[in-house]
Image (cartoon, rainbow, N blue to C red):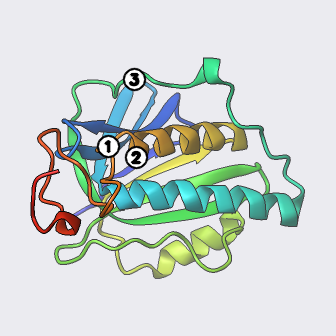
Amino acid sequence: MTHQVYSFEPPERFVAGTVGEPGDRTFFLQARGGGRVVSVALEKVQVSLLAEKLEELLVEANKRFGVSLPDAPVIAVHDNEPLDTPVDEEFRVGTLGLAFDVDTSTVVIEAIEAGEAEVEIELGDDDPAVDEEDDDEDEDDEPDDDLDRLRVRLTPEATRAFIDRARRVVAAGRPPCPLCGQPLDPAGHLCPRHNGYHR
């Protein structure tokens, strides 16, 4: 069975977003460009780690290659718009890969479909800054060549905007209980620090 590669190099818009109420949200990465919209589902922890690792990648690219780091986006330019509808899930993400293309000074993000049995989080190698040539060589050896994937190429500025929104999306969930740290439902929760009484 042939796999599908959804490539946006660059996308008109690439964001993390959710569908549903806090406590019952489904997280998505969504890319738009060339009249297409592609949405892939993933876990909250994957969105959080992706933002963290992208930040590390930008810092590493600055150290190694002198890439100028953009400032944090100005509040007026935050992308607070909802996901484009309809939100049709193309696949569930199992692996996330990151690379930095030195020739074009762009960040490459690849979301690869989960295999049949596992969902794992892999955000690149120990060496986050690799050029596109190394990335292409690695692709020939990948065991998951038959899995669908979403690939986007972002400027450092667009990457910073993605990081900012992803962090806001993750933080917009249920607030933590001040005693036990578990998420608070609107009706409260059975807090272990209160011997099971509602809080």
Check the image and report above or below for 48 versus 7: below
Q: Earlier in the sequence, mark 2 or mark 3?
A: 3
Out of 76 and 158, give the one closest to the viewer.
76
Q: How many numbered dots are placed on residues in this image?
A: 3
Q: Position of residue 26 (x, y in %)?
A: 23, 45
Q: CA distance from mark 1 to mark 3?
A: 31 Å
Element class at badge 1: loop
Q: Position of residue 128 (x, y in %)?
A: 66, 70
Disc number placed over residue 162 in the picture, else none: none
Which residue is most to the right? 66
Foreground mark, 1 or 2, reads: 1
Q: Earlier in the sequence, mark 1 or mark 3?
A: 3
Amino acid type indicated by mark 3: Gly
Disc number placed over residue 173 in the picture, else none: 1
Q: Residue at x 80, y 46 (%)?
A: 69
Element class at badge 3: loop
Element class at badge 2: helix
Seen in the image, is 71 located left or right of residue 85?
right
Q: Position of residue 165 (x, y in %)?
A: 50, 37
Q: CA distance from mark 1 to mark 2?
A: 6 Å
